[in-house]
């Protein structure tokens, strides 16, 4: 007689593999790479110039400080705080952003789903542009890159993945982990060390010391703006069924 399973025995669910990356993350990475390859290697100088002028974030154009701002598309000022995330300076720039997008975007997308993930990335980009504008309101050079959005993903991961997972477990983290309160995160050793390294690194770039360790002209303000938004505002995008009983939504 075949023994029957005990109905009271808990069912062990298999953990998702570490590199089971959500399709939305892979799609965003592919989009960034395709746009970069097209702009750098396939587009004509005229098309490339149009992309930089109308997709990058140029703070000084909001005050019409240069004639070239007048030839931008009429709605450029409305969409460029988000669209600048689509452009990158060189292969290393897009490669690093895609790497961190893979690492930190995977747990966030797995937790909140594709639509909320995209909305969160766009909001992080806008937050990064906003803080960049505060520091550089008259700058007429274009600001590009997905670093503001990626930093927002890092900040969001600090609210649920880093406190309890960390390391390789970060890629497996998802909806099962509770959303940690802000004060609880700030007393978690893993989160505190990560945040400290993040801010010290950006402080080094802000003082020019970071040039010895990476490319110059780093928009550290956008990094900080995206990270602060992601850390403080992640609960606004989190699904209610993942917050957990008794957990505050902030």
Image (tube, rainbow, N blue to C red):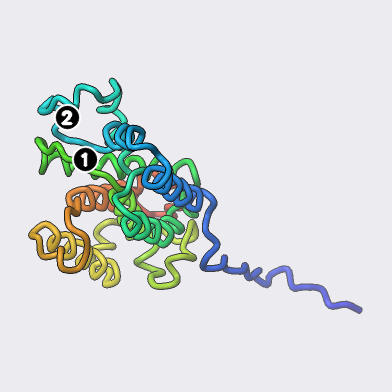
- Across the whole image, how many numbered discs are drawn on residues? 2
Which residue occupies 30% across, 40% down? 84
Eyeballing the image, is 23 above or below 173? above
SS at circle 2: helix
Residue at position x 34%, y 60% from top? 96
Residue 125 drawn at (x, y percent):
30, 43
Query: In the displayed structure, does residue 240 sit left or right of residue 89?
Result: right
Secondary structure beneath disc 1? loop
Q: Residue at x 30, y 48 (%)?
A: 145
- What residue is pinned by disc 1? 142
Q: Residues within 10 Å of mark 2 (few under 14, many from 20)?
A: many
Mark positioned earlier in the residue sequence (2 or 1): 2
User: 96 or 155, which lies in front?
Assistant: 96
Looking at the picture, tell me which residue is in the foreground, 34 or 23: 34
Q: Is residue 250 visible?
A: no
Percent position of residue 82, x then y: 32, 37
x and y, in percent, of residue 248 in the image: 34, 51
Residue closer to the observer: 216 or 14: 216
Image quarter for residue 193?
bottom left
Residue hosting label 2: 61
């Amino acid at each position: 007689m075949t023994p029957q399973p005990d109905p009271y025995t808990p069912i062990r669910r298999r953990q998702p593999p570490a590199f089971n990356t959500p399709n939305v993350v892979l799609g965003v990475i592919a989009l960034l790479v395709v746009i970069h390859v097209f702009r750098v290697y396939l587009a004509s100088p005229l098309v490339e110039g149009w992309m930089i002028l109308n997709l990058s974030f140029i703070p000084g154009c909001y005050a019409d400080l240069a004639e070239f701002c007048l030839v931008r598309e009429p709605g450029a000022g409305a969409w460029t705080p988000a669209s600048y995330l689509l452009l990158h300076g060189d292969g290393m720039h897009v490669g690093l952003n895609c790497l961190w997008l893979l690492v930190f975007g995977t747990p966030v997308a797995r937790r909140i789903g594709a639509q909320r993930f995209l909305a969160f990335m766009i909001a992080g980009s806008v937050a990064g542009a906003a803080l960049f504008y505060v520091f550089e309101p008259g700058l007429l050079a274009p600001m590009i890159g997905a670093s503001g959005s990626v930093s927002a993903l890092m900040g969001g991961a600090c609210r649920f993945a880093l406190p309890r997972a960390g390391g390789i477990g970060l890629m497996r983290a998802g909806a099962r982990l509770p959303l940690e309160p802000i004060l609880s995160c700030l007393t978690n050793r893993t989160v505190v060390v990560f945040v400290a390294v993040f801010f010290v690194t950006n402080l080094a770039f802000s003082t020019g010391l970071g040039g010895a360790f990476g490319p110059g002209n780093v928009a550290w303000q956008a990094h900080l703006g995206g990270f602060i938004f992601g850390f403080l505002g992640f609960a606004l995008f989190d699904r209610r069924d993942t917050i957990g009983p008794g957990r505050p939504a902030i």
